[in-house]
Amino acid sequence: MESFLLANQSAVYACLFLGTLGAVAFFEYVSPKRDLKASMRVRWSGNFGLLVINSALFWMIYPGFGIGAAIVASGQEWGVLRLVAMPYWLQFLLSIVLLDLGHFGIHYLFHRIPALWRLHRLHHTDHDFDFSTAVRFHPGEAVLEHGANLVIVLIVGPPVLAVVLFFFSYLLTTFWVHGNVRMPAHWDRRMRTTLVTPDMHRTHHSQVAEETNSNCGGLFSCRDRLFGTYVDEPGAGHEGMAIGLPEFRDERHIRLGWMLANPALNPLRADEMAREAGASAR
C-alpha cells in the first residue's frame, strides 16, 4: 500500500480532491442546512480563484513535500517518536495523533496572534458557508501553514505511510466540515464525540467573537474540549447565526482582488473603503 501511494500520490490526491468536492457539493444540493444569501457566482469565482493561485504555489504538490520530510526524518532518525522503541502500529497511531495536534496548534495560533490573524481572517470573511469556503485561504497563510506542517513532520518523525494517510484524511475532511449539509441531530452527536462535524465547524464561522475563536479542530473533536475552545452550538442557532466578520460585510470582500488585499485592510474602515472604491468606479 505504501509503495502504491508513493508512486501514485499525485493521481490519488487529485482523485480524492475532486471526488470529495463533488460528493459534498451533491449533498449540499440534496439537503442544505442553510439558505445561501450571497451571489454564488461571485463567491465561487473568488474562492476558487484563490484555489488556483494557491495550487500554482504548491498546494496540489504539498503532499509530496510532506512525504519528503517524512522520508528525511526517517533516514536521519529524526523526531520524538524515534527516541523510544515501540511497535510500528503504536508509532503509526501516535503519529496521527501528534500531527493532528500540531495542525490544531497552528490553527489556534492563527486566531491568537494578530499578525497571523490578518492573514487567516480572509477565511472568515466569506458571507456564506459551503464547500467552497474550504479553499478560501490567503496565499500568505497557505505558505506559512504548510511550512509549519512540514516542520511538525520533521519534529514528530512519523512513518511515511502515516504522513500520506494523514494528509489524505485532511483533504477528505476539509470539504466535509465546511459542507452546508443537514445531518440528523443524533448522527451529529455521535460523530462529534470523535470527529469534527459540519455543525461543529460552522460555529467557528460565526460573527460572534467567542464562537469565531472556538472549535479549531480539523479532524478530532477532542482537541477543543481538552483546551477549552469547544462551543457546542451557536447562540443564534445554525440557521439563524450570521456568517463571517461584521467589519467585512460589503460584497466586494468576496471578490478575488479585495480578498488578496484583505491582510492590508484596516478592519475599522474596510467596508467604508469598499464603498468608496465602488463609488469612484461608477
Image (spheres, rainbow, N blue to C red):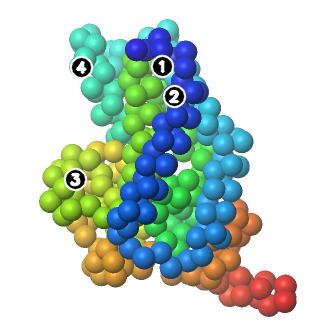
**Label 2 belongs to which residue?**
12
- Distance from disc 3 to disc 1, alpha carbons, whole Å, reads 29 Å
- Distance from disc 1 to disc 4, alpha carbons, whole Å, reads 21 Å
Identify the mark at residue 90; answer none if there is no mark: 4
| Amino acid bearing label 4 | Leu
CB within 8 Å, label 2 to label 4 = no
Seen from the viewer's position, the closer of residues 41 and 244 is: 41
Q: Quadrant of the C terminus?
A: bottom right
Q: Earlier in the sequence, mark 1 or mark 4?
A: 1
Q: Residue furthest front?
A: 30
Which of label 2 and label 4 is nearer to you?
2
Few, some or many residues within 10 Å of mark 4 (<14, 14–19, 20+): few
| Quarter where residue 79 is shown | top left
Which of label 1 and label 4 is nearer to you?
1
Secondary structure of the residue carrying tag 2 is: helix
- Distance from disc 2 to disc 1, alpha carbons, whole Å, reads 7 Å
**Label 3 belongs to which residue?**
192
**Residue 166 higher or lower than 68, as above or below:** below
Secondary structure of the residue carrying tag 4 is: helix
Q: Earlier in the sequence, mark 3 or mark 1?
A: 1
Q: Is residue 3 visible?
A: yes
CB within 8 Å, label 3 to label 2 = no
Few, some or many residues within 10 Å of mark 2 (<14, 14–19, 20+): some
| Quarter where residue 262 is shown | bottom right
**Label 1 belongs to which residue?**
5
Q: Earlier in the sequence, mark 3 or mark 2?
A: 2
CB within 8 Å, label 1 to label 4 = no
Secondary structure of the residue carrying tag 3 is: loop
